[in-house]
Amino acid sequence: MKTYFITAWMLLAGATLSTACSEAPVAEQAPMKVIFDTDMGNDIDDALALDMLYKYADEGRIELLGITSNKEEPQSVEYLDLMNTFYGYPNLPLGRISDGADCDRVNSFTSQTVADPHYARTITDCTTLPESVDRLRELLSEAPDHSVTIIAVGFSTNLQRLLASEADQCSPMAGVVLIKQKVKQLVMMGGDFYPEDDTMAEYNIRIDQPAAKAIFEQWPTPIVTSPFEVGSAILYPVESILGDFGYVEKHPLAEAYKVYKPMPYDRPMWDPSAVLYAVEPDGGYFTVSEPGTIHVTDDAYTHFTPAADGPHRYLSVTPEQASAALARCVELITRRPAPYPVQ
């Protein structure tokens, strides 16, 4: 039972969903194979996005193959293990990063959450986890050809390392060949494209500009990116955090949200927007650009050039689409995970 009031935007969103965004029966669809690459710990929207992926996995819409962190702070993967355990996916493969981009923030929400002994864990020592690039190679080598969607919502460090990787015990293929054979598409959160006279060096691109530049120049599969403006138009309501997670004493998402920054606040849904598009591309929640190419400048700005045979696209969103997208995200995130059924 939702405890916050249903506002006009929710009513509009519900109407939009019922008419334009009806779902196909999940049971009739083969699960989408997904790898999630995240800078968990920098912004709370990563945790919201991961919650959505667990819910999609619960309903059989996706098979979540693994999660790789591109944030070097040890608590990033510790929090991922905590979340996997809480949501009922304790053995989900994880990868950590060493010598990553300089992005660590003091006393992040992951640090504060994992310091609480209340939460169950599965991994005793997260420092024994493989490097993210090695985990990516392992997961891809085991996947059917052209089957994997990578959802990347942080820096491009891990992806660039995968791209540049050499043959190893996981696969005789170099990284670029392995990607081309195993990956169906890459869906990213990153960049800024409109309005053209007010662009910015978006955070995910700026923190590891060389890696982002390499991805857009060398990645061998289609790329769709959800830019800064899309997530900024979709705000997760704090009323939900305060009212929808009381089915447990402490919820690792809600508690992390509360310590990320001083309450109360509504948070832009940058990373959840990428997840929503990747899993439900035909839901009508976003407008997809014409094909083209994305170029990353030396100062980390992103520019799009239309081209009929271009491998890149980016998302935009109308106010009506934003309302529908938010309603869908809230519905997923407030749904109880499989280990916590409604009594």
Image (tube, grey):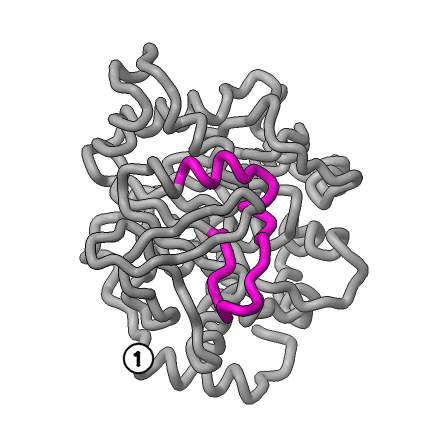
| Residue 284 image point, x, y percent | 33, 72
Residues drawn in magenta: 189-215
Between 247 and 261, which is closer to the camera in this rendering?
A: 261
Between 295 and 278, which is closer to the camera in this rendering?
A: 295
Identify the secondary structure beneath mark 1: helix
| Identity of the residue drawn at 54% across and 69% down | 197
Q: Is residue 342 visible?
A: no
Which image quadrant for residue 277? bottom left
| Identity of the residue drawn at 47% across and 36% down | 67
| Residue 11 image point, x, y percent | 49, 86
Q: Look at the image and say whether residue 202 sits in the magenta stretch.
A: yes
Q: Look at the image and say whether residue 217 sits in the magenta stretch.
A: no
- Left or right of residue 231: residue 142: left
- Left or right of residue 151: residue 281: left
Q: Which residue is mark 1?
A: 20
The residue type indicated by label 1 comes to Ala
| Residue 148 image point, x, y percent | 29, 40
Q: Is residue 9 above or below residue 294?
A: below
Q: Is residue 176 above or below residue 316?
A: above
Quarter of the figure with the N terminus: bottom right
